Image: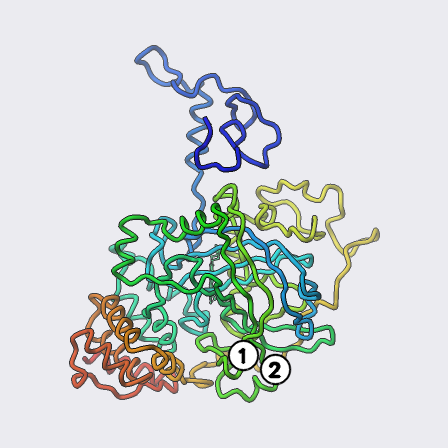
Amino acid sequence: MKNPRDKNGLNEHQPSRNQKVYDKYLRRAGGQLVDNNEDSLTAGQRGHISIQDIWLFEKQAHFNREVIPERRMHAKGWGAFGEFVVTEDISKYTKAKLFSKVGNKVEVFARFSTVAGERGAADAERDIRGFAVRFYTEEGNWDIVGNNTPVFFFRDPMKFIDLNHAVKRDPRTNLRSPNTNWDFWTSLPESLLQVTLTMSDRGIPSSFRFMHGFGSHTFSMVNEKDERVWVKFHFRSEQGIQNFTDQEASYVVGQDRESSGRDLYEAIEAGVFPKWKMFIQVMTEEEAENLPYNPFDLTKMWYKKDFPLIPVGEFVLNRNPDNYFQDVEQAAFSPANIIPGIGLSPDRMLQARLFFYSDAHRYRLGVNHHQIPVNSPKGVENPHNYHRDGTMRVDGNKGSELHYSPNSYGGWQDSPDVALHPDKGGEAKRYDFREDDHDYFTQPGLLFRAMTSEQQLVLFENTARNLGDSTLQIKHRHIVNCYQADPEYGKGVAKALGIDIESVDLTPRLSRSREEWQKDNKRDEDL
Ligand code: HEM
């Protein structure tokens, strides 16, 4: 029988495009024929099962191991393949071969996700969306592992684990808790811009096709003359922006928990290929030194009027994976996947991510996850290195090539030209970022004032609903933070929560030091 969903003419005897040899017989993983896939082997009509039923035990044993660890965050996601084409010449900024010529094309793979929900969570939840794009370039894989927001909740990776504990399930009840979630967010005033975006009318994209993407961090580009500029990456949806209200989302979730994934899959199957234009913002090193805010602070945007969007290229997604588990579940994106001409920055968050992703992949997929087709560098065949062995090594393990260096027989050469651009160092100690820049409220205020009054109302109501059964202390703390951004923001949230603004102590929390912030928290406790 033909699979009705399959438009490519595959049937049950031809389960995969990758499988070259097939026949009509059911076989064990070892290739042996199976005599019966219906009745287990029993001693008599009503007797016990025999251990000789090798097929039954193989079938069950494989099933027992089908589930691999899910991503600790961004567990629920969907992906597709496509193509990126360079439309503008940015070679004055970068020596990356990809950008050496207008018209250059590379295959891409993108995965979109929600953050807090588990692998089975509904798509249409109020949450940040992951926006990860891999470029299979001739210089190796380049991943931009971003979100649909240009900023993040905080600027030091030390808080990342706490964020995930706070937004995920309570260890005792296994329930998600608004109180825990908002206790954390409101205690970090630097999160207000990201929290405002999440609670705004853009907090639930109607599907992945209708949202922008951002590399979020400050990266760098280095040109042939070894000149460096700081760069932010943007992907703007050619489909435009569409969002659900809370009410629409709750209806959608009731009808379809896979609404965003289904939309992406069906659009691509129907030949309606989603497209995003790629832009960069560029800041010189001198501009960065004179900026009134920290250019490497992930809680802040760079103003477009100062650093306009420069078009770069566009990517289209035009092919659904043949197999979800193979390509989407096993995709291993990492911000450490960069190519010559694209560099890093001192953003603390980016720095931490360089190690943590590969660490997660080694746990989730194993040390040889680079061999999984979606992760292998399609633009560089059989990359040379001295890595050997490890679980699930299936690519020949480099045969009889030497596996040590130096050796007397020749080895793989270094490429000094691709060394990261040198950075100025400082004395290594734990610097309190609050002493560097504690302006948490200017940008949320600007965002708030850029909203129409309808959008502001939606923001107040979404916030109030989302705060749910949080304590009065937490609600007051959020009102104070919002009030610092704009008094109308604070008043609007207070009103939506049914709290008299006169009852709130609106003394600003400027948090110049950790000690002062702790004093602020003490004040909340006394509420
Ligand atoms: C997934 C860590 C911040 C975007 C992940 C995963 C880890 C992680 C361990 C799971 C990886 C896997 O199992 O494949 C961290 C840490 C962060 C951080 C330690 C900060 C210190 C961010 C930020 C962004 C981001 C700022 C966006 C700007 C993503 C995306 C995924 C992801 C899109 C899913 C990738 C995919 O589709 O496979 N993160 N993350 N993360 N993270 Fe982060």
Which residue corresponds to the image point at 65% horizontal and 42% vertical from the top-left? 395
Q: Position of residue 258 (x, y in %)?
A: 36, 49
Q: Which amino acid does label 2 sit on?
A: Thr
Is residue 68 found left or right of 137 in the rendered image?
left
Q: Position of residue 464 (x, y in %)?
A: 23, 70
Which residue of the protein is positioned furthest toward the front in this rendering? 271
Which residue corresponds to the image point at 43% horizontal and 68% vertical from the top-left? 149
Which residue corresponds to the image point at 61% horizontal and 83% vertical from the top-left? 285
Q: How crowded is mark 1: few (under 14 residues within 10 Å), some or many (20 or more)?
A: some
| Numbered tag placed on residue 338 in the rendering | none
Q: How crowded is mark 2: few (under 14 residues within 10 Å), some or many (20 or more)?
A: few
Element type where label 2 sits in the image: strand
Q: What residue type is labelled 1?
A: Pro
Vertical placement of residue 365 versus 199, above or below = above
Q: Position of residue 526 (x, y in %)?
A: 20, 80
Is residue 50 found left or right of 368 in the rendered image?
left
Element type where label 1 sits in the image: loop
Q: How is the image coloured?
A: rainbow
Tell which circle, 2 or 1, labels the residue nearer the N-terminal end.
Answer: 2
**In the depicted view, which residue is nearer to us: 183 or 484?**
484
**In the depicted view, which residue is nearer to us: 11 or 19?**
11
| Numbered tag placed on residue 284 in the rendering | 2
Which corner quadrant holds the N terminus?
top left
Of circles 2 and 1, the one toward us is 1
Vertical placement of residue 419 versus 490, above or below = above
| Numbered tag placed on residue 308 in the rendering | 1
Which corner quadrant holds the C terminus?
bottom left
Q: In which quarter of the image is residue 338?
A: bottom right
Q: Position of residue 289 (x, y in %)?
A: 57, 86
Which residue of the protein is positioned furthest toward the top in this rendering? 44
